[in-house]
Image (cartoon, rainbow, N blue to C red):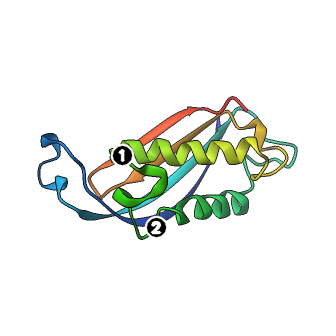
Amino acid sequence: MYAVEVRDHIMIAHSLKGDVFGPAQRLHGATYVVDVAFFREELDPDRIVVDIGRATDTLKQVLQALNYANLDEHPALAGQLTTTEFLARYIFDRMAEAIRSGELGPHAGGIDRVRVTLNESHIARAWYEAAIGA
């Protein structure tokens, strides 16, 4: 299995309702380092997994809608509990759509799986990984 991973970051604010979240129930900020890994069994005709430039640009576009936002007030996330795990899936869905629509290049449809990892700190991270099914 071949893989390529690109990275960016976002700064967000949110609150997490529910006793399980303790002090995170109050409005607080978080900085996430976001890694997106693209996996495929065979390289494409250009002998790459994905165009790194396109993957980086697409990730930046996806994250732009979240960066410096209060997720409690974000129109696309209204009423959602924006945990790290939830955000990993949210970003995954947008990256998967970009693959399916051809934004990552003509051969990106050969990508088998994608993993989106949100690094919350040097000791905690969460990810969502699934097949693309392009």
Looking at the image, the residue that sits furthest to the bottom is 68
Task: Rate crowding at label 1 as few (under 14), some (14 to 19) or many (20 or more) other CA atoms within 10 Å.
Answer: few
Please, is residue 15 above or below residue 132 in the view?
below
Image quarter of residue 68 = bottom left
Q: For this view, does 21 lie left or right of residue 87?
A: left
Which circle marks residue 67 in the picture? 2
What residue is shown at x 33% (from left), y 56% (from top)? 120
In the picture, which quadrant includes the C terminus? top right
> In this orientation, which residue lies closer to the viewer: 51 or 32?
32
From the image, state whether disc 2 or disc 1 is nearer to you.
1
Residue 14 in the image: x percent, y percent? 30, 59
Location of mark 1 (residue): 79
Residue 44 in the image: x percent, y percent? 82, 42
Residue 32 in the image: x percent, y percent? 39, 60
Q: For this view, does 81 lie left or right of residue 51?
A: left
Residue 42 in the image: x percent, y percent? 76, 35
Identified by mark 1, the residue type is Gly
Q: Judge whether residue 104 can be spotted in this image.
A: yes
Identified by mark 2, the residue type is Asn
Task: Rate crowding at label 2 as few (under 14), some (14 to 19) or many (20 or more) other CA atoms within 10 Å.
Answer: some
What residue is shown at x 77% (from left), y 36% (from top)? 110
Q: Dot 1 lies on which element? A: loop
Do labels 2 and 1 touch, CB within 8 Å?
no
Precedes in sequence: disc 2 or disc 1: 2
> In this orientation, which residue lies closer to the viewer: 52 or 71?
71
> In this orientation, which residue lies closer to the viewer: 70 or 30?
70
Q: Dot 2 lies on which element? A: loop
